[in-house]
Amino acid sequence: MNVLRILLPLSIAAALVFGQSASKNVPSDQLKQSATVVLSLYQKLVAHQPSGTVKDAEMKDYLPYLSEGLRHKIDLSRACLADWKQQSLYSQVKEGMNSDAMFFIGIGNSPISFRIEKTIPQKDGSLRIYVRLTFKLPKYPPWSQRVAVVMIQESGLFLVDDVIYINDSNWDDHPKDKPADRRLSGYLSAGCDGAHWIGSRLPNEPTALAQGLNQQVVARHPLDIPSGEDWKVFAPYLGKTMMKRIDDYSACMEDQDRRFGAPDLKPPGLIEDGIFSGSNEEADPRSFRVERSEQRKDGSVRVYVRFRWEVPPEKPSFWRVADVFLQEDGRYLLEDVIFLKDEYHPEEARLSKWLAEDCDGPRWVGYPIKK
């Protein structure tokens, strides 16, 4: 399929969008052609409103916009996820947490509109085209986020080679701690070795598993249930029981939002909690140390982990959790996290109880629904 045949009707609009973005180093016809590609791609995304796994017919509509390298990465990623689903240990995976809709957007929701803001030529000859996406969910006001579409030349055409998900969060107080922008290429390759899922290659020893799990916790600071790239990284550590709890919790939060959600109310659940480390500052540990492991009579193994949080000039704080691992089909997997009692935590808490709070399986049974 000839990409120019698709894009020619948009060339005038592209010229208008990029009229003030032209660079002395990039010919205007190249800027116009790259803008046309991005305009057409995001118009299709808004029209299709994809969610979950994109159907093959829809994916064919997107392929003419993509570089050969990005097409190959997508093929490998889809093969890897197919390999994942064939492994019985991960049968509880929700498609929404590994959504093709995230490819060009960065989150599982689909945008209702978009606006191209600017283009910035790069030293390697590529272009970065910045796009502001607007989203709207029932009962909530609209919000926006930005992506930077990386364009490269192939056979005389500019095509999409990657997408950068811009982190516009305010980190004025601690700018050095601001997470780096993530990329589509990182999402596609997370948890994969080419076309093969690497979850079964994790160490089968509880202490080593806790070490690997918490290295990712410190690096990624996941809040609530991980999604996208984070989900692909953390899911291999989780056992069937934990997967089922997460599925039920996610369905319960959707039920609550559908029946009771309101834009002026803070939603319930774990949106400010690190499910592997704790609440508030504990969701943002800066380092950790595995202390010891303990075999329990029920066959489980508890691995005790000490976290540290510190932002100068404040004094560092420390707290401990116990990662609970249990064997399933001959492999140790995470079944629970215990947030241990100490001078700052008067009671022991468990992730399993957090996930079930105010829920009866997938049903919300918390505070009453306003009529």
Image: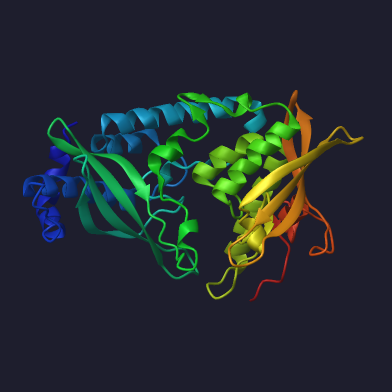
Residue 117 location (% of width, % of height): 24, 60
Quadrant of the snapshot with the C terminus: bottom right
Residue 93 seen in the figure: no
Which residue extends farthest right? 297
Residue 90 location (% of width, % of height): 63, 32
Which residue extends farthest front? 313
Question: In the picture provided, is 28 more to the left or to the right than 295?
Answer: left
Q: Please identify the quarter of the rendering in which residue 86 is found.
A: top right
Residue 173 location (% of width, % of height): 49, 68
Up/down of 353 relative to 289, above or below = below
Up/down of 67 relative to 173, above or below = above
Foreground pick, 136 / 190:
190
Specify the color scheme.
Answer: rainbow
How many numbered discs, if any?
A: 0
In percent of the image, x 61 and y 24: which residue is there? 201
Up/down of 241 relative to 271, above or below = above
Q: Please identify the quarter of the rendering in which residue 154 is found.
A: top left
Question: In the picture provided, is 352 more to the left or to the right than 23?
Answer: right
In percent of the image, x 50 and y 57: which residue is there? 177
Residue 119 seen in the figure: yes
In percent of the image, x 41 and y 66: which residue is there? 143
In percent of the image, x 67 and y 27: which residue is there? 203
Question: In the picture provided, is 29 more to the left or to the right than 316?
Answer: left
Quadrant of the snapshot with the N terminus: top left
Foreground pick, 357 / 184:
184
Question: In the picture provided, is 67 more to the left or to the right than 140?
Answer: left
Foreground pick, 329 / 340:
340
